[in-house]
Amino acid sequence: METSTAIFLSMLIPTAAAAGNMVWRNQPNLRDGFTFVCAVLTFLCVLVVLDNVGSGSTLPITILEVFPGVDLAFNVEPLGLLFAIIASGLWILTHIYGVGYMRGNDEKHHARFFACFAVAIAAVMGIAFSANMFTLFLFYEILTVSTYPLVAHKGTPEAIKGARTYLTILIGTSIALQLTAIIWTFTLAGTLDFKIGGILDGNVEGFMVPLLLGLYAFGIGKAALMPFHRWLPAAMVAPTPVSALLHAVAVVKAGVFTMLKVGIYIFGIDFLAETGASEWLMWLAAYTIIAASVVAMTKDNLKARLAYSTVSQLAYITLGMALATQMGAIGGGMHIAMHAMGKITLFMCAGSIYVAYHKTEISDMTGLGRIMPITFLSFLIGALSIIGLPPLGGSWSKWLLLVGAVDAGHQIIIAVLMISSLLNVAYLLPVVGRGFFLGDTKGKPVAEAPIMCWAPPAITAIGCIVLFVYAGYIETFLTPIAAAAN
Amino acid sequence: MATAEVEHTARTLADHLPVLQILVPFVAAPLIVLFGNRALAWPLAFIASAIAFVISCLLLAQVIDGGFISYAIGGWAPPLGIEYRVDATNALLLFLISGISTVALPYAFTSIRSEVPKRNHTLFYACYMLCFTGLLGVVITGDAFNVFVFLEISSLSTYVLVAQGAGRDKRALTAAYDYLIMGTIGATFFVIGLGMLYMSTGTLNMADLADRIADQGGNRTIRAAFAFIVVGMGLKVALMPLHLWLPNAYTFAPSAVTVFLAATSTKAAVYVLLRFMFSVYQPPFVFEVNTLYFIFIPFALLAMFVASFVAVFQSDFKRMLAYSSIAQIGYMLLGIAMLNTSGLTATVVHMFNHGITKGVLFMGVGALVLRAGSSFYDSIAGLGRRMPLTGAAIVVGGLSLIGVPGTAGFVSKWMLVQAAFENGFWWIAILVVLSSLLAVAYVWRVFEVIYLKEPAADAPRGDPPLPMLIPMLILAGACLWFGIDTQLTIGAAHTAAESLLEGSFGMAPSAAAVTETLGH
């Protein structure tokens, strides 16, 4: 198959899945089965692209010119391809999990739910394959709008309030700051194409560089950089599959992915390093890492704790870009994959616990580990990967970020990364410890959630281990994004 | 060459397109009254409107790449005779006005039956055709006094159309009366301005006026005329703070009338402003008097913020949209005030994009009114779920109103922000994006009302009948289409902006010969 065909199909198939959900809204098995087939096909399309292009890049495939000099165009490059593989691959698992969760929990409006979900995936594919900032922004906003109904899904006053926060912050920052930054970039550089080495070098100087970077960094609200992180905990009112795929993987990763794209292809790592424009961003990211971890420790609600943990982990990736070193960028890129695999495991476990026993508070989970051993083991593995211990995937990306910090000569950042790991231990492991070692469960049999709920997190937990072994491939795969600049 | 006159010889029917554009709907109006048959009124109006739409497409195709068509009415050469002049700017508007009219008529067919008493239907369509003719005429003519004549034709028929809303709500009568008073004041100011121009130049042809104003320089009468024209048109445009007629007129008029008016009438007035500021008065003149910087920018910003803010707190969907229209007018005027190609492109393209956006939204309101009987938030709660396609169309229109990428509204907002940056007015760029956040607030309130509130137990079910539904979906599709494929809109608007900034095309070569022989 042609690469361009595969790219289009990877966006069209999820759209078709959304349409199928609306058409067969009253035939649950047909509807969910069709979506599953679509998810597998989407993943296969992305694999075809991988097979054709490898870690190379293609020229932009232009659909049409929207404004003079601004095209709607797609291309393939390693970072985007990696993001597409993760999102489409995890969609398959999340869909299985989602069906189990929605049915097991008697949620309403299944068709609308899965349709919006599929549109969100189509938007993520568009983000991953966009060839310029305009195309990326287009799909970025489609992603925001299509996930709003998912957050407001329950329709309770609490859900509506959460969804309102979600929307206000994401649309507000993207229109007020990011759009301004994009149009400003366009008037400065005359183009918005992603180019290795950036397009701004020589077009802007002085204090304008950090200012423009700031408009981007805060404008990309999905990256949840403090102080624009409030939407992420607010979005936790959504059903757990949404939190798992969208708010641990697709939406937030779209944010940090955009951040990396801006750093690498709009500004250029060397340009950032020369001007030192990203130094303030590095400190802000470091602050977010620590502060969000501290807040996470105070949360008793498991999903809220995971949400703040996500805020903290996302800042790792922003930090990787802001370090303005090759290793930092590669480490940031790799952390997208590692954190996605770890965090989705944790969220799906949280959801399984809710489906089986309707427990949301950590203090209520005493002894639950002995009743749901597989779920809690998966949680443990995911947690260890987030903490960054070998033999789990998360250790490599953290390692590369450390190397990046050393290259940049920032010892304090090294300390920040270390402290953050310790804080991760402090807020994640007690959940497991309480589940396995505390309380009295004599006489209660082992009873897991339905298989469609416990199997997917078990698979992603194994994925965390597999990623540890194959991290070298990802590093080689991502090398072109940083190397070619010199 | 951009200023070249398109080859035009008045030998075949195709050469008479400019006048047919006006004549077809103009003749349809008395025909409808003469037949006096309710069953025939609608088909006649629709056929006339469809023909006008086809003509506008043909005209747009001829001038989209630049140049203009000059047509002398009755063979009387300008500047003595009346000249119709079509270039990219007004061709795009002719396309918008006749396009909206053609999709609004099927909508009116059903909507009017539920909102206007039967005995008025024949006269309603006759007035509609007159209003349509007037708007087309205002846009197409190249003669300043003829603008006034057509303006009055459209205004007088609009007052009648607005008053037809009295079947549903008696307040339509006072709304129409308010509009009558304000509209007449505006028209009076405008005609006083024209009188002053005629007094000091002795001509009323726009191209000829441009040449003579350029020769004379700005004497005081000419400057005063400029002030009168801007204020007069400001009333018609609903430039804040001259907007008071608009909210009531839009709220109480029958739904189909609101659709048509909101999408076209203020746009025609903005066009007249553009024409006078750039073609009659040369750009440097406008620039010198600093009207733009000291009047347009502050009032445009005022409209963008105050009207949007007021819109957030409305409890009636239709009224909210009316205030949003006032705010959107601010964007168009701001684009003019940028005085560069991107800014004028933004203005022209926003006239078009906002026309289709408001068209679909008012159609959506009309459909809700048809089912729920009112457009208050309380009575339309949860209806988005009961009327899925109407709800979807409203969502598309709402997103376009905010300017979410992928919709028509985004395209114009992008051009406007780009224009501000090109001028170095970064603070204006920031204010533009901030004001669109207010749009998020008022649009999202509607989304929450129609989707997230529980519908009343006895709430009506089902989308409106097809004649209302199809036009709505066509316009919603257009909102998405013109958000991605901008060849037509940006293409025409860009040509228009460039030619406007160049100033007047001057007299057409054929007419210049006449001027020569007359000896001035």
Image: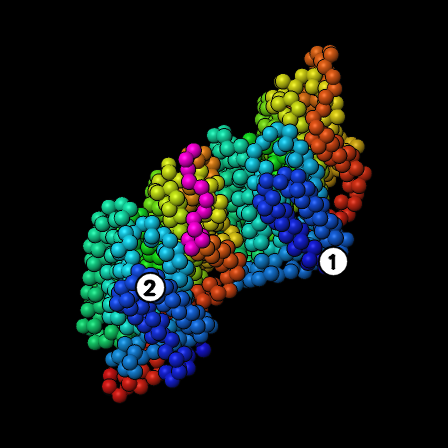
Give the vertical position of A80 relative to B282 (above or below): above
- Is A175 or A225 nearer to us in this picture? A175
Badge 1 crowding class, 10 Å Cα cut-off, few under 14, some 14 to 19, many 20 or more, is: few
**How did the renderer colour the structure?**
rainbow
Residue type, numbered disc 1:
Met
Give the vertical position of B59 relative to B454 (above or below): below
Q: Which residue is mark 1?
A: A1
**Which chain does the residue under circle 2 lie in?**
B
Q: Quadrant of residue B437?
A: top left
Horizontal placement of B221 versus A99: left or right? left
Give the vertical position of B451 relative to B30 (above or below): above
Q: Which residues are magenta?
A: B457-469
Q: Is residue A254 visible?
A: no
- Is A406 or A86 nearer to us in this picture? A86
- Cα distance in 3D space between marks 1 and 2: 57 Å
Secondary element at tag 2: helix
Image x and y of residue B31, in percent: 29, 68
**Secondary structure predominantly adopted by residues drawn in magenta:** loop
Horizontal placement of B1 versus A195: left or right? left
Identify the residue at the far right of this view.
A469
Q: Residue at x 29, y 54 (%)?
A: B118
Count of marks, rendered view: 2
Q: Which residue is mark 2?
A: B40
Secondary element at tag 1: loop
